[in-house]
Amino acid sequence: MARQPVDTYARRLDPGVRKAVHDNSAAGTGKRYTILGEDYAAADDLRKLAGAIRQHSIEHLDEYLARAEESLTRNGAKVHFAVTAGDACRAVSDILKASGARRVVKSKSMVSEEIHLNDHLEREGIESVETDLGEYIIQIDGDHPSHIVKPIIHKNRRDIARSFEREGLGEYNDDPEVITRRARAFMRGKYLAADAGITGANFVSAESGRLVIVTNEGNSRFCLAPVRIHIALVGIEKVVPSDADLAVLLNLLGRSATGQQLTVYTEFINGPAPAAQPSGPREMHVIFVDNRRTEVLASDCREILRCIRCGACLNVCPVYRQASGHAYRSVYPGPVGAVLSPLLAGDKFKELADLPKASSLCGACNEVCPVDIPIPDLLLRLRNRAHREHVPSPGTPPMAGFAAVGSHPLLWRAAMTLGVVKDYIPMLDKMPVPYLGSWLKTRTLPEWRGGKFRAWMKSRGAGKGGDRP
């Protein structure tokens, strides 16, 4: 992944990648606005209701996790809790080894990306194949997802055709239908040969113990139908109180993520397959993953745990559209990633502390969020934390000088006078200023547009008992 600040990465981004990310993101935002407006007269009220449901869930997470464990166990599932990413990876490989499973098929799971599960399984000698088409392409290319919902938003069909040719899935052909048909043929064999299936979960109902998985490709069903073991990796924040809450959240998830009223496949999994069922996993394991989520819950940014991973904030964000997901150096890109990634980094917070500054604070991310997360407020809180912890901002000059000028009227008036002179002495733009050299390489001083306000105030007698505007 990128190791430079978001703005530096964006400047060096291939124009073709930028166009792909920008156009796909803009299209997703457009679809969301259209379908929400058509289906709901008061969509904003629904967002606020969903936000209240999710906030209630995380504020009572201890209670609902206990209920979820009880319900899942009653349904025949085995429940595990993983404190760290390493714990989660070991729990998966221990389950697989105990049953002799050596081949795994995976449905799309952001948690598995977060904990680097594929790398762990490879080290353990277990074959793991991503079955979501986008995730599979990411896997064979040794790449990283650039979007929460659309992992290969940064690629085009020609890129995919070259990858398929390289992997021996057929001669170069960039026709989308041919690409899809070849992927289906390849995956079919992997599904039938697999010993276990790994999925994530969009939600877990504490009331019923149902796992909810939404996809558009149906690959999660294929992952589970022929295998003996089902392992679900679930972030602890995905628990909701009741089945009734799912009606609100699912209606917003599809519309916000892909502009659909409902995803093509919405599965409610009650537990392992009963003995009378001819197919399906006989064992079901649910691993609740913390991986610093309880630390986030204890912070002043806990609202980010409401997130339902729809990607709407990425699609609308002007910074993400120009920079792509890889610029964020994390599994979670865009506005949600700019908040969540530094929080999940723990002791490495400083390495990602610049991400909250990769925002114009325009507020669009909050306006489109289906669970009404106040992302701009959270970004400001993290900026303040970086300031308190003395984390330098790459490419930004020290602001102490500006603070001094802005705090002393005489210095400020002198600076304003210099602004007027600048229009008559263009070389002032080129003058070497300590600490500002690299910053001014990509910025110019704006055209002078002021100078009359103080005179106007003085003429009105401000400060001397006269009228005030």
Image (tube, grey):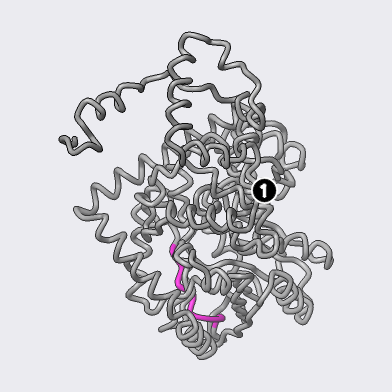
Task: Please tell me which residue is depicted at 38% across the width and 46% down the height of the picture.
Answer: 363
Q: Nearer the viewer, residue 165 or 458?
A: 458
Per the image, the residue denoted by label 1 is 144
Q: Nearer the viewer, residue 163 or 144?
A: 144
Whether residue 74 sits left or right of residue 366 in the image: it is right
Q: Is residue 269 magenta?
A: yes
290 to 147, vertically: above or below: below
Q: Nearer the viewer, residue 355 or 153?
A: 355
The kind of residue tagged 1 is: His
Q: Residue furthest left?
A: 467
Where residue 271 appears, as percent x and y from the top left, is: 53, 81
- Secondary structure, mark 1, is loop
| Picture quarter with the C terminus | top left
Q: Residues within 10 Å of mark 1 (few under 14, many from 20)?
A: some
18 to 143, vertically: above or below: above
Q: What count of labels does the image hold? A: 1
28 to 188, vertically: above or below: above
Residue 320 visible (yes or no) = no
Where residue 66 appears, as percent x and y from the top left, is: 50, 87
Which of the 4 image quarters holds residue 303?
Answer: bottom left
Where residue 141 appears, as percent x and y from the top left, is: 73, 44
Q: Nearer the viewer, residue 272 or 11?
A: 11
| Picture quarter with the N terminus | top right
The part of the chain drawn in magenta is 266-273
Task: Please tell me which residue is depicted at 63% across the width and 24% down the height of the picture.
Answer: 441
